[in-house]
Amino acid sequence: MKSEDKIQSEIFQWFWNSFPDYLIHAVPNGGHRNVVEALKLKSTGTVPGVADLIIHLPNAKCVMCEVKTEIGTQSPAQKKIEAKIKAMGGNYILVRSLSEFKEQIKKIIL
């Protein structure tokens, strides 16, 4: 089974090369940090649960993309962000592979 990092890397590279006029970037919310750095990140705008990738599209549209493994599950914070984005009419996708990402993103941008 592929790791979440591997899946995310494949997604990023494919999108970056396939749609060079758009912007995709990672949100490094995960990982282990010391208390001082964690407090600094929180005070400067790091929000728990924000999706792994943000894709900026024309006309101020964006897509939040959460990447999980085949068996991965969203945290309560991630579910809360998903609900908030969808309630505002935004685009939020949860994907488990590059092929699933391609299928979902093409529905939004093509």
Image: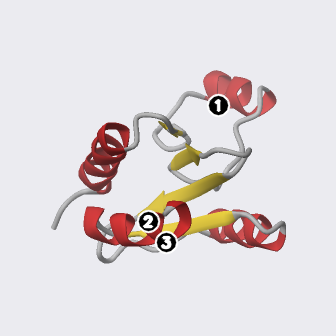
Q: Which residue is mark 1?
A: 38
Q: Amino acid at mark 2?
A: Lys
Q: Amino acid at mark 3?
A: Lys
Residue 97 location, quadrant: bottom left
Instruction: Check disc 2 and report its element: helix, strand or loop.
Output: helix
5 on left or right of 64: left
Instruction: Check disc 1 and report its element: helix, strand or loop.
Output: helix
At x 30%, y 38%, the residue is 17
At x 48%, y 34%, the residue is 21
| Name of the residue lying farthest toward the front | 110
- Disc 3 crowd, CA 10 A, few/some/many (<14, 14-19, 20+): few
Mark 3–mark 2 Cα distance, whole angstroms, equals 4 Å
Locate residue 79, reporting x and y percent. Answer: 65, 71
Q: Relative to residue 74, is residue 22 depicted above or below?
A: above
- Disc 1 crowd, CA 10 A, few/some/many (<14, 14-19, 20+): some
Location of the N terminus by quadrant is bottom left
At x 46%, y 40%, the residue is 31
Residue 14, disc: none
Q: Which residue is mark 2?
A: 106
Locate residue 110, reporting x and y percent. Answer: 49, 63
Q: Amino acid at mark 1?
A: Ala
Mark 1–mark 2 Cα distance, whole angstroms, equals 36 Å
Cβ–Cβ under 8 Å for marks 3 and 2: yes
Q: Nearer the viewer, residue 98 or 108?
A: 108
- Disc 2 crowd, CA 10 A, few/some/many (<14, 14-19, 20+): few
11 on left or right of 86: left
67 on left or right of 80: left
Q: Which residue is mark 3?
A: 107
Q: Earlier in the sequence, mark 1 or mark 2?
A: 1
